[in-house]
Image (cartoon, grey):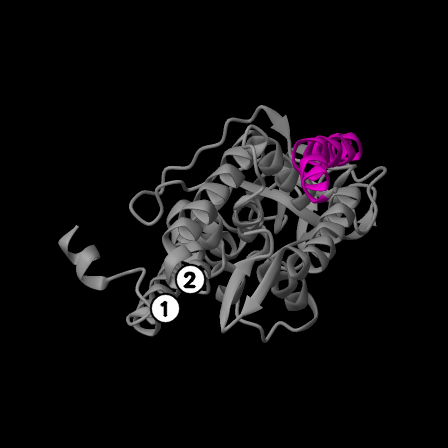
């Protein structure tokens, strides 16, 4: 998986054509959720080294939250937190953000299995393998300021002008 | 589609029920995945439980952490399983490094005989950026969203 900075930047860049910043935060939240949902698995995996009583299955159960059907389910759960009138739109934004996350991750290459895109219906795994799994480390230092500058130019500047007398 | 419409997925009136259904779906998916992962006949645990059957067969360890370097020809790696022994050149490896390894299980050596290794030299940077990203997200979320009348909203919405 790429890091959250890369995912956030890609999501913001994808929404730059939009004239206003409405729903961008929700879209970005959607793109971050699959990795946020993996934090317990990472913690449990390392905790098992010193606490072998932790069952192995507890490290695996979070994985579907990083796969399409789990992303859809997670997006729906989060969308339920939004007001009724916004719920459908929130779900779509979160889901699209999650799919963008997966698309970015698919560009990486790993030894072993790719992503089980059709889980639980198929165990076929896939990844494009275009970049190494750490390639984003070299991209982040310039991607973050570039994205922040472009987002400010696109949305922040207009907002400032709108409130100016 | 009729079932979907009957669930009234966006309505406040059905919100608690639908939340429970969605959570149950995720729990079921998680359980299914765990069952699948633990039954895969590609892991160290499976191979060592029936060494005669799996002797000489390939194992893959993507992004495992080096947890021991006993000598120049052996090292230990850990992820879900701790301290899997690998026979291979450990020159330059140190505890805490992240590696991906492809090798063959050897019943006699009770180890994975390394065929290919990739040392992920930027992994620590990636982990640091990952943690920073999570912290940044924790800070940004209350700035981008607000809780009003028991519901979540975008601040700029």
| Chain ID, mark 1 | B
Name the spot of residue A74 as percent of width and height, x first: 44, 57
Check disc 2 and report the residue beneath it: A77
* Distance in Å between CA atoms under marks 1 and 2: 6 Å
- Relative vertical location of residue B93 with respect to residue B145 in this rendering, above or below: above
Name the spot of residue A129 as percent of width and height, x first: 55, 27
Name the spot of residue A89 as percent of width and height, x first: 40, 49
Check disc 1 and report the residue beneath it: B19
The residue sitting at 36% across, 47% down in the picture is A119
Quarter of the picture containing the N terminus of chain A is top right
- Relative vertical location of residue B155 with respect to residue B53 in this rendering, above or below: below
The residue sitting at 57% across, 73% down in the picture is A54
The residue sitting at 72% across, 35% down in the picture is A157
Outermost residue on the front side: it is A165
Q: Is residue A96 left or right of residue A52?
A: left
Number of labels in the image equals: 2
Write down the region rendered in magenta: A135-163
| Of the pair B85 and A95, the residue shown nearer to us | A95
| Callout 1–callout 2 Cβ contact below 8 Å | yes
Is disc 1 in the same subunit as disc 2?
A: no
Under tag 2, what secondary structure?
A: helix
């Amino acid at each position: 998986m790429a890091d959250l900075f890369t995912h956030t930047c890609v999501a913001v860049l994808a929404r730059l054509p939009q004239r206003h910043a409405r729903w961008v935060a929700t879209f970005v939240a959607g793109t971050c959720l699959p990795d946020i949902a993996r934090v317990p698995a990472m913690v449990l995996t390392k905790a098992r080294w010193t606490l072998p009583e932790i069952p192995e299955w507890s490290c695996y159960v979070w994985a579907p939250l990083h796969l399409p059907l789990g992303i859809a389910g997670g997006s729906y759960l989060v969308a339920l937190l939004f007001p009724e009138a916004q719920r459908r739109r929130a779900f779509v934004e979160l889901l699209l953000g999650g799919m963008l996350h997966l698309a970015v991750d698919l560009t990486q290459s790993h030894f072993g299995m790719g992503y089980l895109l059709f889980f639980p219906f198929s165990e076929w795994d896939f990844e494009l393998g275009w970049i190494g799994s750490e390639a984003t480390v070299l991209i982040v230092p310039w991607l973050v300021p570039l994205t922040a500058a472009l987002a400010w130019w696109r949305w922040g500047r207009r907002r400032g002008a709108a409130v100016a007398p | 589609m009729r079932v979907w419409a009957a669930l009234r997925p966006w309505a406040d009136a059905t919100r608690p029920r639908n939340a429970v259904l969605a959570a149950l779906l995720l729990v079921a998916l998680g359980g299914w995945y765990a069952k699948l992962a633990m039954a895969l006949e590609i892991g160290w645990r499976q191979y060592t439980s029936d060494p005669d059957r799996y002797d000489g067969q390939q194992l893959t360890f993507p992004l495992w952490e080096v947890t021991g370097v006993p000598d120049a020809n052996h090292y230990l790696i850990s992820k879900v399983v701790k301290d899997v022994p690998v026979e291979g050149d450990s020159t330059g490896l140190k505890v805490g490094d992240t590696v991906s390894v492809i090798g063959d299980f050897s019943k006699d050596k009770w180890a994975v005989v390394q065929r290919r290794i990739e040392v992920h030299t930027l992994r620590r940077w990636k982990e640091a950026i990952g943690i920073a990203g999570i912290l940044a997200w924790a800070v940004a979320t209350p700035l981008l969203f607000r809780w009003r009348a028991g519901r979540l909203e975008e601040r700029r919405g």
